[in-house]
Image (tube, grey):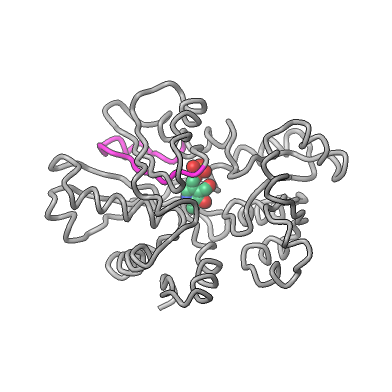
Amino acid sequence: METSRNQQVKLEEIESAGVSLWMKREDELHPHISGNKFRKLKYNLEEAADREYHTLLTFGGAYSNHISALAYAARVNGLNSIGIIRGEELATRPDLVTENPTLAFALSQGMQLEFVSRDIYKSRHEEEFVDLLRQRLGDFYLVPEGGTNDLAIRGCEEILQAGDQDFDYICVSVGTGGTLAGLINSAGPGQEVLGFSSLKGDFLDKEIGKIAICKDNWRLVNDYHFGGYAKINEKLISFINQYYRSTTIPLDPVYTGKMMYGLVDMIRNNRFEKNSRILAIHTGGHQGIEGMNQKLKKKKLPLICVGDE
Ligand SMILES: Cc1ncc(COP(=O)(O)O)c(C=O)c1O
């Protein structure tokens, strides 16, 4: 089974609070299929091969980590890939596609991109819509948005390793909740799993309850989404840059940056008992930094500076 190292995070506020914090560097598992994508795709790729599919189809936004990882994984596994991308404006603006680092990478891996309106995109969970896609694009193995399904959750159950049973808290950032569900399932007795929501909305509680084994060892932290999915501000950028300078750990602005901002804030405010041992899962997402920096540049905001100084 693939393992990643736990890196201790040493910051003044952590020491003052009398707790210890570690990051599980799942982002180092693979340069293109990093973090939770590696875990989520593992058994789905096996299943697609066992069932002799030639094509993977999935859904995502224009900067999606999942789209990028699946495009790469399909190519190296000798499969075709199709990405149904939210945003019909991209269909008539090839310049926007080639300027977008995520989509340009997906294209370079041979992914066929199909752009749909935000309205049509909402049908992505409907069987009728998927049938229509099959009629138009041929047969495919369907990987849902964000890669989350039962096989993905099974993969995410492998994130925690034997030595990790000593931690009191396991923290992870939450989009669809698949990674959190895997951790809830595999957490040991006495461990609490905290999911840091990267988007607004209390619906996630219900969604995660549906997909994880029925356990009461987890809770969602909803205070650090910064206004919603992919919304960021100067405070968050400054935190990500400072964190990188102090720890050498790069964070992404959509998921892990928000989680660590929240976690350090909670530690500073003594929300954990003294001597707590906390493990935060680094779920990757570095590929999204370039696209975010393009947007920040246009808005004349400070850039995320991680990795290339
Ligand atoms: C880097 C990163 N971290 C965390 C998440 C959240 O994972 P999940 O959708 O399983 O909640 C995602 C999205 O899939 C992601 O790309």
Q: Position of residue 64 (x, y in %)?
A: 59, 55
Residue at image coords 30%, 33% = 192
Q: Is residue 35 visible?
A: no
Question: Horizontal placement of 158 versus 66: left or right?
Answer: left
Residue at image coords 56%, 37% = 152
Residue at image coords 59%, 59% = 63
Between 67 and 291, the one lying in front of the other is 291
Question: Horizontal placement of 298 versus 4: left or right?
Answer: right
Q: Position of residue 199 (x, y in %)?
A: 46, 47
Whether residue 172 is in magenta: the answer is: yes
Residue at image coords 35%, 31% = 218
Whether residue 138 is in magenta: the answer is: no
Q: Is residue 118 visible?
A: yes
Where, by quadrant of the figure, is residue 242 drawn? bottom left
Is residue 306 positioned above or below 172 on the image? below
Is residue 122 positioned above or below 257 on the image? above
Q: Residue furthest top?
A: 214
Question: Horizontal placement of 131 versus 267: left or right?
Answer: right
Q: Position of residue 198 (x, y in %)?
A: 44, 48
Tell me which segment is drawn in magenta. 157-175
Between 12 and 293, the one lying in front of the other is 293
Q: Position of residue 52 (x, y in %)?
A: 79, 37
**In which quadrant is the C terminus drawn?**
bottom left
Q: How many marks?
A: 0
